[in-house]
Amino acid sequence: MSLSISKSLQYRSRRAFSRAILIVSLAFFAFFTLFPFVWMVLTSIREGSELYQVGKNPFAVKHLTLQHYYLLLTETRFLQWLGNSAFVAICASAIALVVGLAAAYSLGRLRYRGGGFAALVVFATYLIPPALLFIPLNTVVNRLHLSNTLWALIVVYLTFLVPFIAWLLSGYFKSLPGELADAARIDGASRWQAMILIDLPLILPGVVSVFFFAFTMSWSEYLYAFTFIRSTSKLPVAVGVVNALQVGDVYFWGQLMAGALLGSIPVVIIYSFLMDYYLAGLTAGAVKG
C-alpha cells in the first residue's frame, strides 16, 4: 500500500514539475514575442522628451500623448501608403493564388514524365534570394513599361509568391484521395471541373492559409518596393514610413512606432477573423489521405 502511495506521489510530483516547466517556457516565449509590440506602443504614446529618458523604469509613461499618431496621419501620406499596400497585396496574392493553384494541381495530381524535376525547379525558384533577382527583374519591368508603378510590384511579387503557393498546395492535392476526382471524371466532368468542384472545396482551409501567407509577404516586402518605386505617392507603407521618418541619422521614433503599429492592423484583423481557416490549413496537407 505504501509503495503505491509513493508511486502516486512521484507521478504527481513529476507531473507538477513538467507543468511548471511548460508554464515557465510559455511565459518566456510570450515575453520575447510580445515585448517588441509593447515597446512600440510605449514609444508611440510617449512625448518626444521622454523617448531618450526612460530612466530606471522603462515601462513607465509620465505624459501620455497621441501627437505622434496625429503627426503621422496629417504630415505624411500614411493613408495613401496603406491603400497602395492593400492594392498591391490583394492583387498580387489573388493572381498568384490562381496561377499557383493550377501549378499545384499539376504537381500534386498529375503523373507525367519530368513532374518530379518540375517540382524541384519550382522549389529551387522559391529559394533564390530576392537580392539576386531585382537587377534582371528591373529589365523586365522596364520592357513592360511598368517602371515606377504599383503594377511593377504586382508583377515582381509573383516571382516568389507563385512558387511558394504551388509548392505548398501541391502537398494538399497529394493528400486527397484520387477516387473522388476519378468518379467525377467517369460521370462526365472535365479535369478542370473535377478540380474546381471536387478537389478545391476539400483543400479550402489550405487555400485560405496560403493566401494569408502570400498577403503577409506582399504587405511587408521591402527590397523590391524600395527598388522599383521612386514616387513618394506610390510607395507601400513598409517603405513610405521609413523613408519619410528617417532623415539622415535622425529617426522620428514616435511616429515610426505609430506607423509600424497602424501598418500591422490590417494583417492582425485578417488573421483574427479567419484564424480557424488558418489553423486548419497549417496541417491539412500534412497527413496522407
Image (cartoon, grey):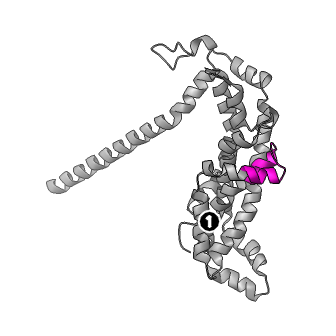
Relative horizontal placement of residue 139, taking residue 108 as reference (left or right): right
Q: Is residue 274 visible?
A: no
- Image: 258 above or below 55: below
Residue 26 magenta: no
Q: Is residue 280 left or right of residue 99?
A: left
Query: Looking at this view, is 41 or 153 the one in front?
Result: 153
Q: Position of residue 142 (x, y in %)?
A: 80, 50
Q: Residue at x 74, y 24 (%)?
A: 72
Which quadrant of the figure has residue 56? Answer: top left
Where 231 sits versus 279, above or below? above
Query: Which secondary structure class fits the magenta region best?
Result: helix
| Place of residue 76 in the rendered image (x, y in percent of width and height, measured from the top left) | 77, 25
Q: Which residues are magenta?
A: 138-156
Q: Residue at x 21, y 54 (%)?
A: 7
Q: Quadrant of the N terminus?
A: bottom left
Q: Which image quarter: residue 278?
A: bottom right
**Measured from the top left, where is residue 8 in percent x and y?**
24, 53
Mark 1 residue type? Val
Tell me which residue sits at (61%, 79%) in the image.
114
Taking the view exactly as shown, the residue that stands out farthest to the left is: 2
Q: Is residue 258 above or below residue 285?
A: above
- Does the magenta segment cover residue 154? yes
Number of numbered markers: 1
**From this viewpoint, is residue 130 visible?**
yes
Image quadrant where one finds the C terminus: bottom right
Disc 1 on helix, strand or loop?
A: helix
Which residue does the numbered mark 1 point to in the structure image? 122
Q: Say which residue appears at 75% left-offset and 80% top-offset.
A: 191
**Counting other residues with Cα less than 10 Å from the Cα at mark 1, is it few (<14), some (14-19), or many (20 or more)?**
many
Direction right: furthest residue: 145
Q: Position of residue 38 (x, y in %)?
A: 55, 29
